[in-house]
Amino acid sequence: MKARKCNKQIQIEFIRSMKFNLSVVALLLLSISSCVKPPTYPDVPAIEFISVSKQNMIEGDSLMITISFTDGDGDIGAPDGTQTIDTLPFACKVPSGNSNFYYDPFKTMFILDERDSCYMSVYKAAYIEPKGKFDDISGEIAIITPPVACKKFPPQATDSVRWEIRIRDRSGNFSNPVFTPYITVNCQ
């Protein structure tokens, strides 16, 4: 009888200590998870240059430019069903600032060729839907350029090109500009 009482007491103490240990573990996990704060970014998009797929290329080739972005209100990309790419030979020397060209809602990514201040292309960034209760988003964008042409006159064996890239969110906020390194183009 005494042995049963003793065993029952040990069992009760064991259960109490397990409850205490589980409570401590749960409290510890809860406090750790509450320390992890979601990222907060400004509502104006910010971009950073990551890479280009080649440093040397042959005229007529394309290359991939990769940038990263952050946006606090998550309004990156143009509405679905809009045009995805627009090559703009007519957009050379488009005035900066108040031009309607910049505020067309279908144009959300601008790539300026520094050799002649012409827009090589204007892209529609993919529509990004924020998920969860926070609007802050971040990610990477890979851009495939149209075929690159040599622009030196008189024609020479090589040309050098550098692009300025900016994005615009649906609220009309422009990102900071980023620049590719100079790329050597072997002219044909």
Image (cartoon, rainbow, N blue to C red):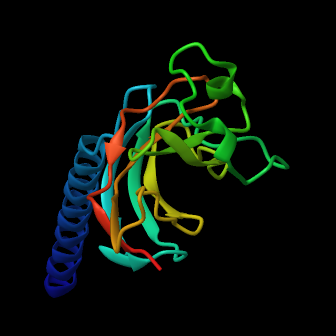
State the residue in front, 95 or 116: 116
Q: Classify residue 108 as left or right of residue 54.
A: right
Q: Does 141 appear above or below 77?
A: below
- Residue drawn at point x = 23 percent, y = 67 percent: 18
* Pick the front one: 187 or 180: 187
The spot of residue 181 in percent (x, y) is 26, 58
The reply, left or right, for residue 146 in relation to residue 14 is right
Number of labels in the image equals 0
Could you tell me residue 47's position as x and y percent? 37, 43
Q: Residue furthest front?
A: 154
Q: Residue at x 61, y 23 (%)?
A: 171
Residue 165: quadrant of the picture: top left
Q: Residue sitting at 59 percent across and 44 percent down?
A: 130
Comparing 36 with 106, the one in front is 106
Residue 159, how many percent across, how many down? 35, 64
For residue 96, side relative to residue 100 (left or right): left
Q: Is residue 130 above or below residue 12?
A: above
In the picture as drawn, the residue positioned furthest to the top comes out as 98
Question: Which of the 4 quarters of the picture holds residue 67?
Answer: bottom left
Return the residue nearer the eye: 142 or 130: 142
Asked whether residue 38 appears in the rendered view, the answer is no
Vertical placement of residue 151 versus 186, above or below: above
Q: Identify the image quadrant of the N terminus.
A: bottom left
- On screen, 178 above or below 99? below
| Residue in view at x 73 percent, y 38 percent | 106
| Residue 124 locus on image (x, y percent) | 67, 48
Q: Residue furthest right?
A: 81
Residue 165 in sight in this render: yes
